[in-house]
Amino acid sequence: MSKEVCGEISLFRSLIENRRFMLILSCSSFCTSPWKDFIFIHEGVPHLCRFDDITLRILESVLVCKDVKLLLQITSTLKNFMRYESLQVLREITALRSVDDNLNIVEFLVRIFALIGDDESCLALRYEALLMRERKAPSDQRLRVSCVEWFAFAEHSFQNGFCSIARMACEKALLCFDTNSITFDSETGHHFNYLIEKIEELKDSAAMTSSSHSVQAKTAQYLKIKPVETNSDQTFPLIEVKGSASDMFREGIKRRHLRQLHDARGRYRPSE
């Protein structure tokens, strides 16, 4: 890796870390009034922890690389770094005064993960943002999540193999409707019943696919019992349930990877 690339990566990392540090400082109850006056401007957005296009442009310059092997190494490094940093940021932004600030920062993180090709983290953060809006919608109707948004998220989740998340998103989309109504939905340009039908079709497909994966995993587990019976006392570690929506989403990713491991062992088990 050239010195120039290393320097750009270091600059990007330092920008993210500095913005997170100032975010923590601005949200801290120990921050004195002079610090508050220095950090906050206008609507209370921290000046020094702004997540902006400058940082994104630096990231784009880092990712301009013709060497495929080097590019994979760079993106892997950035994925690991940003996954850690994004979790730290999510723990801090709840202390911000404005939900708009929270959503802007989450959107910034989504754009970073999109640039480095981390689809899993993109979906996890989009899910976090949708739930954040849903929680605040009763007091601010402009934050209401429409059925179209839930449906679009469900489709993207299903296409990326996260069937259980897709099914949950479909259920939330259906809650946006009065199922007894046949009035015209001006927002979507379709009749309620037509859109409900499309959502229910996706929900059923997600449920069937998820169930199929579960059966395949159990079959693979059964088929590999004998070849590994000497190690039958070994089990996979339990995944602790977290409160954050993004943590929940990542647990789903881990479970999917375990299912894929079971499938692979079932297909390529040693012959007796």
Image (tube, rainbow, N blue to C red):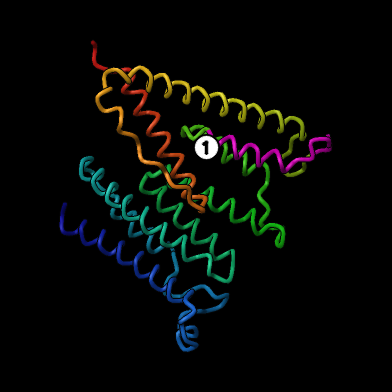
State how many labels appear: 1
- The image quadrant that residue 102 belongs to is bottom right
Vertical placement of residue 149 versus 14, above or below: above
Q: Is residue 171 above or below residue 243?
A: above
Taking the spot 81% from the left edge, 38% from the top edge, the residue there is 184
x and y percent of residue 125 in the render? Answer: 49, 50
Q: Check disc 1 and give the amino acid type.
A: His
Q: Is residue 256 magenta?
A: no
Instruction: Based on the picture, tell me whether residue 167 belongs to the magenta stretch.
Output: yes
Which residue: 23% across, 46% down?
Answer: 73
> Horizontal placement of 207 versus 14: left or right?
right
Q: Measuring 50% from the left and 53% from the top, which residue is drawn there?
A: 244
Vertically, is 33 above or below 54?
below
| Along the line of sight, the residue nearer the viewer: 112 or 229 | 229
* Residue at the disc numbered 1: 156
From the viewer's perspective, is 100 left or right of 222? right
| Residue at the top extreme of this rendering | 272
Please state the extent of the stretch shown in magenta in the rendering: 164-184
Relative image position of residue 109 (x, y in whole percent): 44, 56
Q: Image point 71% across, 41% down: which residue?
A: 175
Identify which residue, 114 or 25, lies in the foreground: 25
